[in-house]
Amino acid sequence: MRYIKDGKARNMALLIFGIVFLFLFSACGVKNQSIQNSDDWKDEVLYADECGFDGLRCCDDSEQPCKFGQNCCVNPGNKKENYCAESCDFGKENTFCRNENPVCDIDLTCENSRCLPCGGEDQFCCQTQDFCKNSLICFNNKCVSCGQAGYPCCDSGLACLKQDNRGNTRTECGNGICRACGYGGTEACESEPFCNSGTLNSNGVCYQCGGLNQPCCDEKSCNTEEGLACELGFCGKKN
């Protein structure tokens, strides 16, 4: 009889524990849902802040697409694009391009439906005859200086600004473009020295040489000041 009573007590305790556990779990679930709802509310506010203000897209609200009485300016070339501004006078800097000529004011060019500064260093080329200021060259629709690596060679003076360098950043003109060559990790130059001092020409590429764990330079030489010697084509510490 005592065993039966103990069993009943144990079962009753388990039942009570289960009820308490379910209650706590449900409460946590409600709390987590409340937190989630709170985060959703914050996201909705953040999303609402992404429209209607100066320079931002117009809100979908037909009665008040812009805050503070600003106007909703619509791109003449694409009715789906818009922004809020005090004035919708197009053709000025950072505004939509006009639908008629001139599409932008002077010193501006139309790029991606916006009027942007043009003609200066690293700016877009002006649309009038690919014009660039201060002797800059229009290259890939950007105004750049000649002679720099990756840019057109100059027509007068040095074709490339660093073509006479015999260290890092050496350049040479090839097919009208200045390219890096002659130093570690670049292609060999077409004129001598094909690779600068301290580099090794291997299959048309210049590699750093003579240093610790680097390939030996010409005539199996290594940096003796560091106590290196050439063994099996690489420089290592002398034994």
Image (spheres, rainbow, N blue to C red):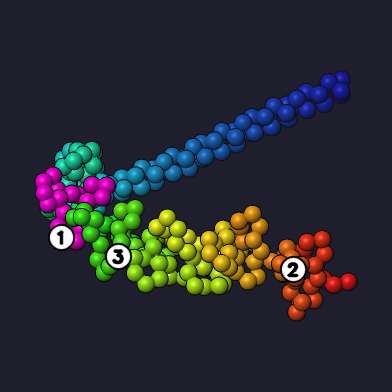
Q: Mark 1 packing: few (<14 Cα in 10 Å), some, or many (20+)?
A: few
Could one spot residue 93 in this view of the protein? no
Name which of mark 3 and mark 1 comes first in the sequence.
Answer: 1
- Asked if the stretch drawn in magenta spans residue 111, the answer is yes
CB within 8 Å, label 3 to label 1 = no
Q: Name the residue under label 3.
A: 136
Q: Residue at x 60, y 65 (%)?
A: 195
- Give the left or right position of residue 222, taking residue 134 as reference: right
- Give the left or right position of residue 189, taking residue 10 as reference: left
Q: What residue type is labelled 2?
A: Glu
- Image quarter where the C terminus lies is bottom right
Q: Is mark 2 on a helix, strand or loop?
A: helix
Q: Mark 1 points at which residue?
A: 106
Name which of mark 2 and mark 1 comes first in the sequence.
Answer: 1
What is the span of residues highlighted in magenta in the rendered image?
A: 96-113
In the image, farthest residue toward the bottom: 225
Q: Which of 118 and 12 is in front in this view?
A: 118
Q: Is mark 3 on a helix, strand or loop?
A: loop
Q: Which of 91 and 27 is in front in this view?
A: 91
**Where does the image place residue 36, in percent across and percent down from the top left?**
47, 40
In the image, farthest residue toward the front: 192
Q: Residue at x 30, y 58 (%)?
A: 138
- Asked if the stretch drawn in magenta spans residue 143, the answer is no
**Where does the image place residue 94, in percent across and percent down from the top left?**
23, 55
**Where does the image place residue 115, in percent across and percent down from the top left?**
21, 54
Q: What residue type is labelled 3?
A: Leu
Q: Residue 219 carries which label?
A: 2
Mark in the foreground, 3 or 1: 3
- Give the left or right position of residue 19, taking residue 116 as reference: right
